[in-house]
Amino acid sequence: MRFGVIGTGTVGRTLAEKLVELGHEVTLGSRTKDNAAANDWADRAGPYGHAGTFAEAAEFGEVVLNATSGTVSLQALEAAGAERLAGKVLIDVSNPLVFSATGELSLEPVNTDSVGEQIQRAHPDAFVVKALNTVTAPVMVDPARIPGEHNLFIAGEDVEAKAKVRAVLEEFGWPAGAIIDLGGIEAARGMEMMMPFWITMMRHLGHADFNYSIRTAN
Amino acid sequence: MRFGVIGTGTVGRTLAEKLVELGHEVTLGSRTKDNAAANDWADRAGPYGHAGTFAEAAEFGEVVLNATSGTVSLQALEAAGAERLAGKVLIDVSNPLVFSATGELSLEPVNTDSVGEQIQRAHPDAFVVKALNTVTAPVMVDPARIPGEHNLFIAGEDVEAKAKVRAVLEEFGWPAGAIIDLGGIEAARGMEMMMPFWITMMRHLGHADFNYSIRTAN
């Protein structure tokens, strides 16, 4: 399948690399045409990995992943072009982290809105699915790094789109039973708002190789 | 030991009941003198359970638990009286949930502040420890309701106060290794901001008998 990945940071490159490894063809999209990180990545990725602009990545992908920072995702996806996202599954991996000058973390948007919802409102013809934002990049594409059962969450309005995302996540190595569908895109709020806890836990552990396992009585 | 529990809702009554069961003496404090829920509870609780005002509960307790809604906790603790809380461990169990007329959930405070921090600022002479706000009341006092390993989080400025709170939590049945100290009271932000996810998960499961287990690679 053809994927477009919007964003050339660690998350975007990690996802793009895994998709190519799995035999998919990927365009890694950056804000500018001659992004060094994207070109380097494409050079190393072989014939199935390409570098391009946000618009080229969106055009290329049958499925598009938003791997930009949540604070600039709307701009990035506007640059990608609504017409190139229409009718496609758009996996939103972002978190809207804002670090103050003193290192204090906050989220924007938060509480009564989320990046997932913002993107779905701005791109009503795309099928937005929030996923993967609750784990660090290496865990996204290699859940077995963390032993035992642990969970991933998805949220979105379209059932078929969520089924397609599940299939991608299963290719990444997530067991079907580990993926919990939290309902409509509004659930992205709770998923993004776990981030302050996640950062605190990462600082506590001294690394990011951890995840949530939901334990239940029944 | 003598405990004061501020708040007569499900959380307050559940905590008070467990403490009496464990052999402690408890005053369950309500806003008004003749609160039916508190009086009923005290009648059933036997000689170690008492009903009183917020102030009487705070005065009585060597350790005080705030089990009011996070949106009214500052008012409740003001009524309890700063001088009655000074020098004491104050366990803050609250979440600042606001439900709109349409049932939409938000938190207030959120993001750059938390109830835990608000309380610590308002009561600088009390030793505030955030704890127990990430699980439903029956699980707080009976973690074995949920099989397997799962975690509880604490945060606060004072190491000795946190050690006292750990001891209480262990009496409730939490294994020492299950209690994760997230650091200073600012970590209450992340703990409170898990609530939207928690509510979504509760709706997904159809019950509240669940908890987080933090799985790590090392």
Image (tube, coloured by chain):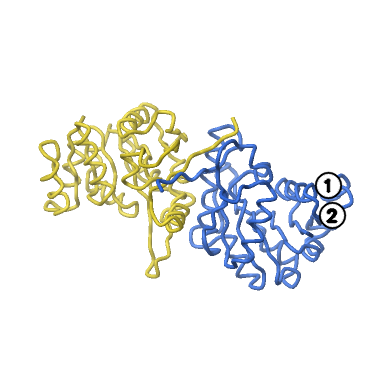
Chain colours: A blue, B yellow
Q: Mark 2 is on which residue type?
A: Ala
Q: Tell me: residue B2, above or below residue B32.
A: above
Sequence-first disc among 1 and 2: 1
- Pinpoint the chain carrying mark 2: A
Q: Is residue A217 left or right of residue B214?
A: left
- Circles 1, 2 touching at the beta carbon (< 8 Å): yes
The image quarter in which residue B82 lies: top left
- Pinpoint the chain carrying mark 1: A
Residue at 38% across, 45% down: B133
**Which x, y percent locates residue A210?**
58, 38
Residue nearest the observer in this picture, B33 or B173:
B173
Residue nearest the observer in this picture, A122 or A143:
A143
Residue nearest the observer in this picture, A33 or A188:
A188
Q: Tell me: residue A19, above or below residue B17.
A: below
Residue nearest the observer in this picture, A217 or B211:
A217
- Residue that mark 1 sits on: A41
Label 1, secondary structure: give it: helix
Q: Is residue B26 left or right of residue A41?
A: left
**Which x, y percent locates residue A194?**
52, 49
Residue at 80% across, 50% down: A20
Q: Which mark is residue A51?
A: 2
